[in-house]
Image (cartoon, coloured by chain):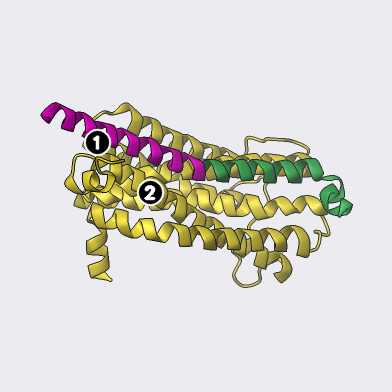
């Protein structure tokens, strides 16, 4: 197990590659989820405002 | 098939169908990447020349492939949008850009982290590295252009022209290691006659490549769904979907 994390002395290069990879891949999943949430709230607000005006 | 494509051109239908597809695609993506990582980091043997450091390949090469693949998808989508004024094609191009930029960034950074222990330098201005950096600038240029132009139609047209002109960079990246002397090693996988890589290394690499491709489709659809919702916010089906209660 220790050997696995040691990566034959290249641990710094190998594991920072995979750490950056993980961050980049996760960021691209989180971004659209957040955008969708904001967008839906924004559209709903617009609808409510219109209804309040016409009422 | 034609019928399906025709229906997908309807924003409402696209939004509904892709909403059902995304969780499944995400699950398959996760399985493929986990299998690829296990095969690449645990099962595959060390390289006889580069030792354990070569394991960056399982991230670097699929990311570099994706950086070019996504660009070509965007260029084709842009051409379709330009010729047939298909809005969905514009949506696909816009939704793909940040993902393509991400993979290009990842290819450059992992290449740098691989180059340091193997070549003794983080960066050289050789053909392969420089043309990949230009690819990153093309992605960033496209995103900036889309953000700078208010009118959607004009933005799509300007973006399409940029993408189509930039296609010239793709064969340059691909053949750069053959055309110019470079530190970067030549192709290992795409030599069809006799790939110079052992199966125990090749299989995890292909799993990662397939996983990245599905990852791209998944997150591109997630972004495209947002884009469709934003563009169609005035239409009846979006208002119905969001409803006054939410």
Relative to B99, B177 lies left or right: right
Which residue matches tag 2?
Answer: B74
Predominant secondary structure in magenta?
helix
Nearest to viewer (mark 2 / mark 1): 1
In the rendered view of the protein, which quadrant contains the C terminus of chain B?
top left
Residue visible at 40% across and 42% down in the picture: B166
Q: How many marks?
A: 2
Residue B54, image x and y in percent? 75, 53
| Chain A visual colour | green
Relative to A37, B14 lies left or right: left
- Secondary structure, mark 2, is helix
Residue B39: assigned label: none
| Chain B visual colour | yellow
Residue B124, image x and y in percent? 67, 36
Which residue matches tag 1?
Answer: B152
The answer as to whether the residues below labels 2 and 1 share one chain is: yes
In terms of depth relative to the viewer, which is nearer, B224 or B159?
A: B224
- In three-dimensional space, the C-alpha distance between marks 2 and 1, rounded to whole angstroms, equals 16 Å
- Secondary structure, mark 1, is helix
In terms of depth relative to the viewer, which is nearer, B134 or B28?
A: B28
**The magenta segment:** A29-55
The answer to whether B31 is drawn above or below residue A27 in the figure is below
> Does the magenta run of residues contain B93?
no
Residue B207 shows up from this direction: yes
> Does the magenta run of residues contain A34?
yes
Residue B128 shows up from this direction: no
In terms of depth relative to the viewer, which is nearer, B229 or B33?
A: B229
Relative to B18, B139 lies left or right: right
Q: Residue furthest left?
A: A54
In the rendered view of the protein, which quadrant contains the N terminus of chain B?
bottom left
């Amino acid at each position: 197990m220790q050997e696995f994390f040691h990566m034959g002395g290249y641990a710094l290069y190998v594991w920072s590659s995979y750490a950056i990879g993980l961050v980049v891949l996760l960021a691209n999943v989180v971004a659209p989820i957040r955008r969708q949430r904001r967008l839906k709230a924004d559209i709903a607000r617009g609808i409510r405002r219109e209804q309040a005006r016409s009422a | 098939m034609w019928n399906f494509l025709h229906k997908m051109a309807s924003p409402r239908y696209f939004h509904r169908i892709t909403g059902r597809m995304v969780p499944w695609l995400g699950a398959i993506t996760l399985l493929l990447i986990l299998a690829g990582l296990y095969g690449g980091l645990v099962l595959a043997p060390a390289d006889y020349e580069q030792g354990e450091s070569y394991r960056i390949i399982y991230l670097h090469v699929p990311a570099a492939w994706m950086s070019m693949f996504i660009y070509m998808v965007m260029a084709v989508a842009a051409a379709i949008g330009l010729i047939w004024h298909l809005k969905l094609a514009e949506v696909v191009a816009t939704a793909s850009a940040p993902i393509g930029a991400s993979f290009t960034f990842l290819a450059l950074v992992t290449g740098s982290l691989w180059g340091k222990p193997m070549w003794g330098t983080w960066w050289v201005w050789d053909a392969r590295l420089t043309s990949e950096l230009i690819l990153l600038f093309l992605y960033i240029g496209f995103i900036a252009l889309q953000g700078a132009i208010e009118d959607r139609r004009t933005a799509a047209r300007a973006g399409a022209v940029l993408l189509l002109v930039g296609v010239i960079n793709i064969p340059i990246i691909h053949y750069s290691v053959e055309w110019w002397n470079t530190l970067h090693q030549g192709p290992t996988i795409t030599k069809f006659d006799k790939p110079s890589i052992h199966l125990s290394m090749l299989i995890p690499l292909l799993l990662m490549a397939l996983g990245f491709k599905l990852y791209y489709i998944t997150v591109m659809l997630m972004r495209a769904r947002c884009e469709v919702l934003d563009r169609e916010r005035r239409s009846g089906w979006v208002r119905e979907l969001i409803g006054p209660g939410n």
